[in-house]
Amino acid sequence: MKLSRLSNPCYSLTVIAIVSLLSGLGCGGGGESAGSAEPAASAPARADLCALLTSADIEAALGTSAGESTSGDDGKGQCRWATADGSGTLVVLMLERADLDSFDEFVANFGEDFGGEDPPREEYHLVEGVAGDWAMYVAEEHMVRAFRGDDVLEVSAPSVPSVEEAQVVDLAARAMANLP
């Protein structure tokens, strides 16, 4: 009778599903608690991006005071600093996964978006002085995208009137210097 149950495909699949579920919950023994289990491979590590810049950093780079910072859930981490009067967003940092090794690879991968041509260099170009593997400026978004390994830190100042590229590059350099 036992042999016939084991040869029944429904029974075997049920046993496999239960064993997989229990081992996934950390019930496999070994003296480890369920709280010390490794995070799932599909769950990206979260980063505390609000720790990358201080209000003093923002004021030094942009020449204006920052309000409160708030964390967000986009990408692998996000932080927004409000304007001092709370009327808008002064600075946004977002960490995401990106698999680009160079600006040339960006051009090759996204050239189709630019009609098969190189991106217009006044809108997209490399910047120096930012830690990481490489960094580029995106003029229309007032953003620096700084690449390190498989991550990209996006640094932007959306509510700063007439923000200069050098100011956003300065913010990105300050943030990347503190990125673990």
Image (cartoon, helix red, strand yellow):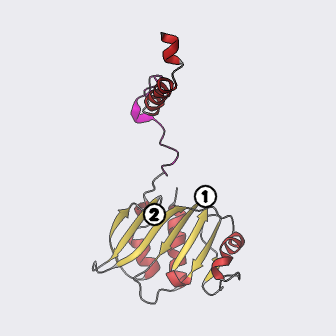
What is the three-letter code of the residue carrying label 2? Leu
Horizontal side, residue 11 vs residue 88: left or right:
right
Of residue 112 and residue 98, the one placed in the foreground of this image is 112
Could you tell me which residue is drawn at 40 percent across and 29 percent down? 33
What is the three-letter code of the residue carrying label 1? Asp
> Please, what secondary structure does the residue beneath circle 2 have?
loop
Q: Whole-percent x and y of residue 7? A: 54, 19
Residues at marks 1 and 2 touching, judged by CB atoms closer than 8 Å: no
Q: Residue furthest top?
A: 1
Q: Is residue 124 magenta?
A: no
Could you tell me which residue is drawn at 51 percent across and 17 percent down? 6
Q: Which mark is residue 52?
A: 2
Horizontal side, residue 79 vs residue 85: left or right:
right
Density class for disc 1 (Cα within 10 Å; few <14, some 14-19, many ≥20) is few
Q: Which residues are magenta?
A: 27-44
Q: Is residue 42 magenta?
A: yes
Q: Which residue is mark 1?
A: 150
Asked which quadrant contains residue 53, the reply is bottom left
Of residue 84 and residue 115, the one placed in the foreground of this image is 115
Could you tell me which residue is drawn at 45 percent across and 63 percent down? 52
Of residue 112 and residue 122, the one placed in the foreground of this image is 112
> Please, what secondary structure does the residue beneath circle 1 have?
loop
Q: Whole-percent x and y of residue 116? A: 70, 81
N-term mark: 1 or 2: 2
Q: Whole-percent x and y of residue 115? A: 67, 83
Q: Nearer the viewer, mark 1 or mark 2?
A: 1
Q: Whole-percent x and y of residue 86? A: 28, 77
User: Principal SS element in the magenta part?
Assistant: loop
